[in-house]
Image: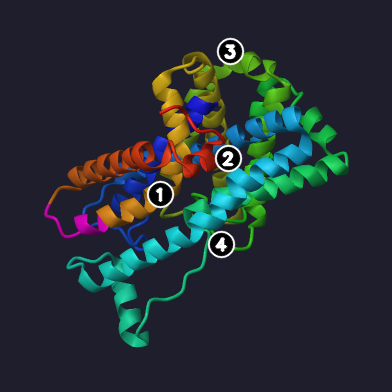
Amino acid sequence: MDNLRALAMLAGVVFHAALAYSPLMHPVWPLADTGQSQVVDVVAWFFHLFRMPLFFVVAGFFTALLVARRGIGGLFRNRSLRVLLPLMLFLPLVLISMQWLTANAVANVAHPSPMLTWLRTWVDQHGEMPSMPSWAHLWFLFYLMLFTVLLWVGSALGLRRIGERIFALPPAALALLLPLPLAISLASTTIPWPAPEFLLPSLWALAFFGLYFALGYQMLHRPAMINRMSALAPALLVSALAAYAALFVMTEGFFGARVTSPIQSALYALLEAAAGLWMTLWCLLAGKRWLDRKQATMRWLADASYWVYLVHLPLLFAIQYRLLDLPLHWTAKFAIAVLVTSAASLASYQLLVRHTMVGTLLNGHRPRA
């Protein structure tokens, strides 16, 4: 699970860097570059379907582990220190840094994105940047705290038995039935699903990510669940790719997903839910097969992943705003953004965080120097 978390975090850097070259995000993403390719949309939105669900499965697994070892009280103490406190400490820093970088780009970038152009007009009319309060990319921490509270409520009301009965189903039944409630939750939002970064929680996100959190929670208590699914691995991968390909083609690269009939919208939501779930399950099976061993490099990356998650987006903003004016092909800009952001995030973790109080706060321990 630690190794899966590390790889999913690195995939997050790639995904956020790719948004600058996504035709779908070009009108709304402030880092949008003049160079773009539909190949980016094909690959990036495929990762999007299962990367954050995989994070919530991992979070649910470790939540169950904490409850088993320390009880609900110990879980709350751990989550308050390692989730709530970092959220409160880093959110202002992230928002202020991204706001400052964007304001600087509005004033100085010679080839602005459509969003920067709109912001430039806003600043000319109002004399200041618009206020955009949100959880930014730290929304995962906000929902993790919500699920911690909901777990306590559910345990007090005896609702845990419902989850136990659901996840006791045969593996094939789970793979076929779980997309239905996931699709119902996705039916009320856009396709692909957006980051629920608004200050108030979104009902669809609570239901959607809550199911993945519950799946991870049950995995600790049902260690044979993954082993029983191993025979389904090839079918899960092929089915996920087929469902995603159908979704991408039918929605015309997601550009046609907004103006559809209710039946088409339901079909799109089901394809999106199925592709995401089946890829998530395949990743768990792949992790069980290839990552279920102790490796020093992966252990270090797992420790670094929390810090990378916190700081990588402001770093991307700083790098990709400067890349907007460089006469390079989008592939070169993409490579520069990923490599420099990853290197800066990981180097700063090793040099400034790992052996400090911040590293202890994020990882719960201070490794030997």
Please rate how many residues cluster around mark 3, counting C-alpha atoms within 10 Å: few if below 14, some from 14 to 19, many from 20: few
User: Along the polypeptide, which appears first: circle 2 or circle 1?
Assistant: 2
Please rate how many residues cluster around mark 1, counting C-alpha atoms within 10 Å: few if below 14, some from 14 to 19, many from 20: some
- Say what secondary structure mark 4 lies in: loop
Please rate how many residues cluster around mark 2, counting C-alpha atoms within 10 Å: few if below 14, some from 14 to 19, many from 20: many
Distance from Cα at disc 2 to Cα at disc 1: 29 Å
Q: Residue 231 — which label? A: 3
Residue furthest out toward the right: 157
Q: Which residue is mark 4?
A: 198
- From the image, state whether disc 1 or disc 4 is nearer to you: 1
Distance from Cα at disc 1 to Cα at disc 4: 19 Å
Residue lying at 75% horizontally and 47% vertically, measured from the top left: 150
Residue lying at 14% horizontally and 56% vertically, measured from the top left: 326
- Say what secondary structure mark 2 lies in: helix
Q: Position of residue 362 (x, y in %)?
A: 52, 41
- At label 3, which amino acid type do we have? Ala
User: Along the polypeptide, which appears first: circle 4 or circle 3?
Assistant: 4
Q: Is residue 239 visible?
A: no
Does the magenta run of residues contain 326? yes
Colouring scheme, one of rainbow, by chain, secondary structure, one colour = rainbow
Residue lying at 29% horizontally and 56% vertically, measured from the top left: 318
- From the image, state whether disc 2 or disc 1 is nearer to you: 1
* Above or below: residue 68 compared with residue 180: above
Q: Which residue is mark 1?
A: 311
The answer to whether 308 appears left or right of 66 in the picture is left
